Image (tube, rainbow, N blue to C red):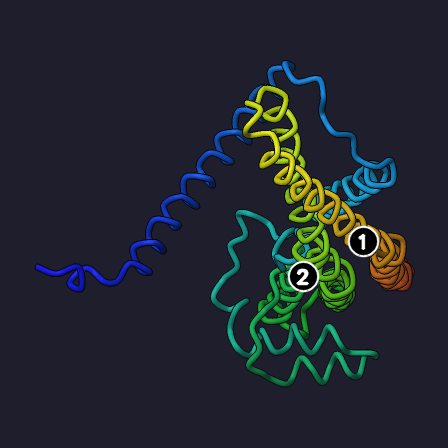
C-alpha cells in the first residue's frame, strides 16, 4: 500500500497542525479555568483592573436593567385582559348569547340615553371582554332586563321600575369604564411594556454579552500573566508574544463594551416610558371618575323620585 492511499505529506502536516492547535486550545482553556478557580477562592491577588469608566457604566446598566425587570414583572399583567376578572365568575348562557354580547359591546359606546335605548333593541356578534367592569355591566344589564321581563308594566311598583332604570344606567357606565380600561391596557402594552421588553432583549442583552467577553479576555490575559512567572526560560519568549496578543484582545473587548454600554445608557428613555404609563393610567381613572361622578346624581335622583312617589301613594290612601 502506497502513501498515496493516505494522502500526501502536506495533508499529514495539516492534520498534525490541527491536533497541535487543539492541544493549545485545551491548554489555554485549562489555564483560564484554573485562573477562574483561584480568583473565586481568593488565591489570586494580581487581578487586572478595569477602567473606572467601564465600572461606572456597568453599575448604570445594571441599575437600568433592574428597573426594567421590576416594573415589567408587574406591568406584564396588562398583557392579560382578564387580570381583574372574577375567578369564580359564572355567567349564564343568556348573558353570553350573541344578542346580549352585542348589546354589551355597543352599549359601552353609547353617548346618550337614546343611543342606549337603540342598542338594547339591536344585536351583534362580538365576544364579551373579560374585565371586572364588563362583568359588572353585564350583570347589571341582565338584572335590569330580568326586572323588565318579569314585571307587568301596568302593575310594576315604582321601586322596581326605578331599580331597573338604575341598573341599566349603572351597566352603561361600567361597560364604558371597561372599554376605557381596555384602552389603557393597549396603551401600556404598546408604549411601556413593548419598548422596555425590546430593550432587555436587544441593547441590554448585547451589553451583557459584551461584558462577558471582557471577563473572558481578562481571564485569558491574567492566566497568561501568571503562567509567564513560572515558565521555563525557553518558553518565555513565546508566552510573552501570546501575552501581548491577549492584552490587545482584552483592551479591544473593554473598549467595545464601553461603547455598547454608553449607547444603552444614552438610548434608554425610562422616564419617557414611565410618563407613558402614568398618562395611560390617568386617562383611564379620569374616565372612570367622570362616568361614576355623572351617574351618582342620577341614581340619587331616582331614590328621591321613588321617595316622592311612595309618599304620594301613602297620601292617596
Instruction: Tell me the residue at 86%/56% (across/down).
Output: 269
Q: Nearer the viewer, residue 262 or 5?
A: 5
Residue beneath disc 2: 140
The reply to whether residue 283 is in sight is: yes
Instruction: Tell me the residue at 54%/52% (across/down).
Output: 89
Crowding near pointer 2: few (<14 within 10 Å), some, many (20+)? many
Q: Nearer the viewer, mark 1 or mark 2?
A: 1
Picture coordinates of residue 131, whole percent (x, y): 65, 59
The reply to whether residue 316 is in sight is: no
**268, above or below 186, in the image:** above
| The image quarter in which residue 160 lies | bottom right
Quarter of the picture containing the N terminus is bottom left
CA gap, disc 1 to disc 2?
59 Å
Helix, strand or loop at disc 1? Answer: helix
Picture coordinates of residue 136, whole percent (x, y): 67, 58
Q: How many marks?
A: 2
| The image quarter in which residue 168 lies | bottom right
Instruction: Tell me the residue at 55%/30% (across/down).
Output: 235
**99, above or below 219, in the image:** below
Residue beneath disc 1: 259
Q: Nearer the viewer, residue 226 or 86?
A: 226
Picture coordinates of residue 199, whole percent (x, y): 72, 56
Instruction: Tell me the residue at 67%/62% (across/down).
Output: 134
**169, above or below 236, in the image:** below
Whichever of callouts 1 and 2 sits on the residue coming sooner in the sequence is 2
Helix, strand or loop at disc 2? Answer: helix
Crowding near pointer 1: few (<14 within 10 Å), some, many (20+)? some
Q: Are marks 1 and 2 in contact (CB under 8 Å)?
A: no
Quarter of the picture containing the C terminus is bottom right
Amino acid at each position: 500500500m502506497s502513501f498515496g492511499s493516505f494522502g500526501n505529506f502536506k495533508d499529514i502536516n495539516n492534520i498534525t497542525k490541527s491536533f497541535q492547535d487543539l492541544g493549545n486550545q485545551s491548554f489555554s482553556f485549562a489555564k483560564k479555568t484554573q485562573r477562574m478557580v483561584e480568583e473565586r477562592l481568593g488565591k489570586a491577588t494580581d487581578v487586572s483592573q478595569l477602567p473606572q469608566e467601564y465600572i461606572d457604566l456597568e453599575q448604570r446598566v445594571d441599575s437600568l436593567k433592574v428597573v426594567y425587570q421590576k416594573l415589567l414583572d408587574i406591568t406584564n399583567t396588562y398583557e392579560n385582559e382578564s387580570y381583574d376578572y372574577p375567578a369564580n365568575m359564572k355567567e349564564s348562557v343568556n348573558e353570553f348569547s350573541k344578542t346580549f354580547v352585542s348589546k354589551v359591546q355597543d352599549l359601552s359606546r353609547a353617548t346618550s340615553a337614546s343611543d342606549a335605548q337603540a342598542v338594547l333593541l339591536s344585536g351583534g356578534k362580538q365576544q364579551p371582554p373579560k374585565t371586572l367592569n364588563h362583568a359588572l355591566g353585564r350583570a347589571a344589564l341582565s338584572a335590569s332586563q330580568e326586572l323588565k321581563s318579569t314585571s307587568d308594566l301596568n302593575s310594576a311598583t315604582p321601586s322596581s321600575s326605578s331599580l331597573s332604570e338604575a341598573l341599566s344606567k349603572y351597566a352603561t357606565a361600567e361597560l364604558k369604564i371597561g372599554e376605557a380600561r381596555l384602552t389603557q391596557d393597549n396603551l401600556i402594552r404598546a408604549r411601556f411594556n413593548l419598548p422596555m421588553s425590546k430593550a432587555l432583549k436587544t441593547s441590554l442583552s448585547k451589553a451583557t454579552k459584551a461584558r462577558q467577553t471582557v471577563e473572558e479576555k481578562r481571564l485569558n490575559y491574567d492566566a497568561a500573566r501568571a503562567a509567564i512567572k513560572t515558565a521555563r526560560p525557553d518558553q518565555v519568549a513565546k508566552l510573552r508574544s501570546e501575552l501581548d496578543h491577549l492584552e490587545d484582545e482584552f483592551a479591544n473587548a473593554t473598549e467595545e463594551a464601553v461603547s455598547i454600554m454608553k449607547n444603552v445608557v444614552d438610548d434608554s428613555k425610562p422616564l419617557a416610558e414611565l410618563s407613558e404609563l402614568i398618562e395611560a393610567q390617568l386617562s383611564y381613572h379620569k374616565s372612570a371618575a367622570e362616568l361614576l361622578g355623572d351617574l351618582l346624581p342620577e341614581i340619587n335622583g331616582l331614590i328621591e323620585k321613588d321617595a316622592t312617589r311612595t309618599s304620594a301613594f301613602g297620601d292617596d290612601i
